[in-house]
Amino acid sequence: MHSMKELTVKNNDSGQRLDRFIGKAVPLLPESLLQKYIRLKRIKLNGKGAKRDTRLAAGDVLQLYINDEFFEKPREENSYLKVGTPRLTIVYEDENILLLDKKPGVLCHSAGTWDYNTLIANVQAYMAQKGEWKPKEENSFAPALCNRIDRNTGGIVIAAKNAEALRILNEKIRDREIEKFYLCAVSGRPRPASGRLENYLFKDAKKNQVFIKDKPEPGCKTAVTEYRVLGRKGQLSLVECRLLTGRTHQIRAQMAHAGWPLLGDGKYGRERFNKDFGENGQALYSYRLRFEFPTDAGVLEYLRGKEFRVERVDFAEKNFGVTELDFE
């Protein structure tokens, strides 16, 4: 639905360009649509079409023939509206789920401030623009992410397209029926070349940091990681890790505690070492997952035993020359 809305330019805004003024007044309107609506005269200045770089004067009246939803107050729930062209790397898609290769630096959800560059906003925009999700009709369900990955870690994030898929996936994740494998680049040579790290992990939520203890202490949780070395080059080793527990920063903290900190890790790593390699942001990627599903999976039964992996991992390519992520 669109109706006409009028905005009057105040003294403070006089001298501003038309497109800049609208961009601030209607923050949910994507840049591409804003320019298009000015061209199509769905945005008028004093009743007439105007160029986007027209300078506004106090007292000017703008007529906006724009869908009502763009005038809502920006929130996490409607940030998908602002996404003009969704930016997603899709690993797999069907009518129930999406597997996305989240790149390092991208947030899964907004962190406090309003942000539309998040993975969830792009997923919802992608589905809304395809017509697969009709936000106006479905008050109860919005496409949702089933797992999160830290901002600077890359990897596969599962999105559910409907309520039933979300319910099943959340249950399977809780019951550890989905296997996740991570690739990381570490300093040094893990010995033995494959093994299991088992410690106790204490989380300091205020510092957003965890501490590893070798003996159980109050407030600690068990952390178990299996690892195997896949390759070596100079001072670096390429390692695959499998999480048997899912604690905050588990791989980063456990590897560092064992003496093999992750390359580029500013929190648990070695600053000097990271500088030498010019890496910032931990070399960690959730690169493959397998739907084990030993118990009934309802409408997702067809995924049982299926495995998916991302196409490339930058740090594996750059530091080890690995282009095929097919390790046996």
Image (tube, rainbow, N blue to C red):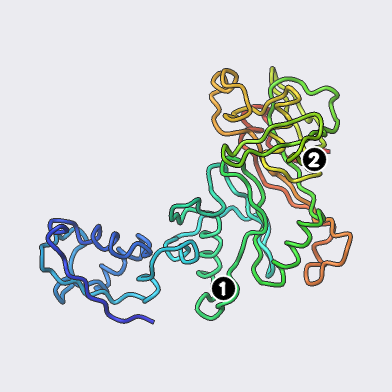
Q: Nearer the viewer, residue 166 or 2?
A: 166
Does 215 appear above or below 219? above
Where residue 122 appears, as percent x and y from the top left, is: 52, 59
Q: Which class describes the residues within 10 Å of circle 2: few (<14), some (14-19), or many (20+)? A: some
SS for tag 2? strand
Q: Nearer the viewer, residue 316 or 291?
A: 291
In the visual, does 73 lie left or right of 163?
Answer: left
Q: Which residue is mark 2?
A: 222
Where residue 248 appears, as percent x and y from the top left, is: 67, 42
x 61%, y 33%: residue: 282
x 57%, y 29%: residue: 266
Q: Which mark is residue 133?
A: 1
x 74%, y 52%: residue: 308
Where residue 244 appears, as percent x and y from the top left, is: 81, 44
In the visual, does 29 lie left or right of 129?
Answer: left
Foreground disc of the pair 2, 1: 2
SS for tag 1? loop
Q: Quadrant of residue 287?
A: top right
Query: Which quarter of the rendered picture does the C terminus lie within?
Result: top right
x 61%, y 63%: residue: 144
Of all residues, the one furthest to the right in this rendering is: 294
Query: Which quarter of the rendered picture does the N terminus lie within?
Result: bottom left
* Amino acid type, residue under disc 2 in the picture: Thr
* Amino acid type, residue under disc 1 in the picture: Trp
Q: Which sits earlier in the primary sequence, circle 2 or circle 1?
A: 1
Q: Nearer the viewer, residue 192 or 110?
A: 110
Q: Nearer the viewer, residue 323 or 265?
A: 265
